[in-house]
Image: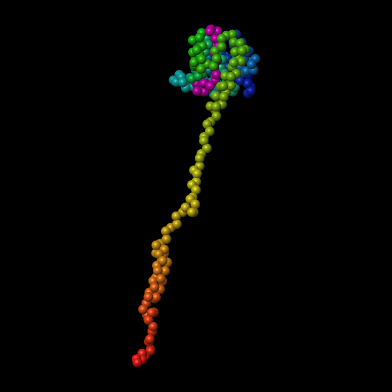
């Protein structure tokens, strides 16, 4: 097992039980400036990734073991299909069933061109299926999948932003012109009209009084002829 560390490069985990094929894929990946870690079995690949089954009680629940957790994260797994104990297809399924590893792109390699095998791997979530011997042109196809996996990881690690709280809008008070004036008492409204009517009535009575039309002869003595 070999591994280099660099923050500016992608880290690829290569899995193959053949030493010759491991050396070949390692050389091609390093030529493309990738960090490379090689293992010879699917179980060692899962151990390196930090996957373990919780006492085999629930195969869908996976966790990361602190003692196996690597400082340099794995950005892509490329694995041979035909391997003893655990095939590349089985390794692919366990990675995609893991909530912590499912975003890691997986590429399958095989020396046998079997369409049903290829389709099954692609349907399970494999990004590519390469026929051996792997060439540099095949390795060049890995970059888009590495970028895609990195974007998904950043997206899921970013906490969702809560929408800004909306403050209640204060209700504007109606203009003073719309405010209703309190009704005035009817007695105050009727009082001026009643007083003017009384004055007018008094003047009319004074003009029509008989005492004002008759001359006064008080104190005079009438002399008859």
Residue plotted at (46% across, 19% down):
59
Instruction: Give the answer, above or below, for where 53 lies relative to 225.
Output: above
Instruction: Give the answer, above or below, for where 55 lies relative to 189.
Output: above
Pick the residue in front: 33 or 87.
33
Residue 9 left/right relative to 57 = right
Pick the residue in front: 166 or 2.
166
Magenta run includes residue 108: yes
Q: Whole-percent x and y of residue 166?
A: 50, 40
Determine the residue located farthest toward the front in the rendered image: 225
Magenta run includes residue 124: no
Quarter of the image containing the C terminus?
A: bottom left
Residue plotted at (56% across, 22% down):
149
Quarter of the image containing the N terminus?
A: top right
User: How many discs appear?
Assistant: 0
Q: Whole-percent x and y of residue 13?
A: 58, 17
Instruction: Give the answer, above or below, for where 177 lies relative to 186.
Output: above
Pick the residue in front: 66 or 204.
204
Is residue 19 among what the camera can see?
Answer: no
Q: Quadrant of residue 128?
A: top right
Q: Whole-percent x and y of residue 18?
A: 57, 9
Instruction: Give the answer, above or below, for where 206 lies relative to 107.
Output: below
Residue plotted at (58% across, 21% down):
147
Q: Quadrant of residue 141?
A: top right
Determine the residue located farthest toward the top in the rendered image: 112
Q: Which residues are magenta?
A: 98-113
Magenta-drawn stretch, dominant element (helix, strand or loop): loop
Q: Whole-percent x and y of residue 44?
A: 54, 15
Is residue 32 among what the camera can see?
Answer: yes
Residue 144 left/right relative to 97 = right
Colouring chosen for the image of the structure: rainbow
Residue plotted at (42% across, 58% down):
183
Q: Quadrant of residue 190?
A: bottom left
């Amino acid at each position: 097992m070999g591994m280099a560390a660099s923050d500016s490069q992608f880290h690829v985990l290569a899995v193959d039980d053949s030493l010759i094929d491991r050396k070949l894929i390692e050389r091609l990946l390093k030529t493309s400036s990738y960090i490379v870690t090689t293992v010879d079995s699917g179980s060692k690949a899962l151990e390196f990734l930090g996957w373990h089954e919780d006492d085999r009680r629930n195969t869908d629940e996976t966790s990361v073991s602190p003692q196996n957790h690597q400082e340099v994260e794995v950005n892509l797994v490329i694995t041979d299909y035909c391997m003893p104990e655990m095939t590349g297809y089985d390794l692919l399924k366990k990675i995609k069933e893991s909530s912590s590893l499912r975003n890691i792109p997986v590429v399958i390699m095989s020396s046998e061109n079997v369409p049903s095998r290829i389709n099954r791997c692609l349907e399970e979530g494999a990004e590519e299926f390469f026929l051996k011997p792997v060439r540099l042109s095949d390795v060049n196809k890995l970059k888009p999948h590495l970028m895609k996996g990195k974007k998904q990881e950043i997206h899921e690690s970013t906490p969702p932003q809560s929408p800004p709280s909306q403050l209640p809008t204060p209700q504007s008070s109606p203009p003073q012109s719309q405010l209703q004036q309190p009704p005035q008492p009817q007695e105050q409204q009727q009082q001026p009209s009643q007083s003017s009517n009384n004055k007018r009535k008094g003047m009319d009575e004074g003009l029509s009084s008989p005492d004002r039309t008759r001359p006064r002869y008080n104190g005079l003595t009438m002399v008859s002829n």
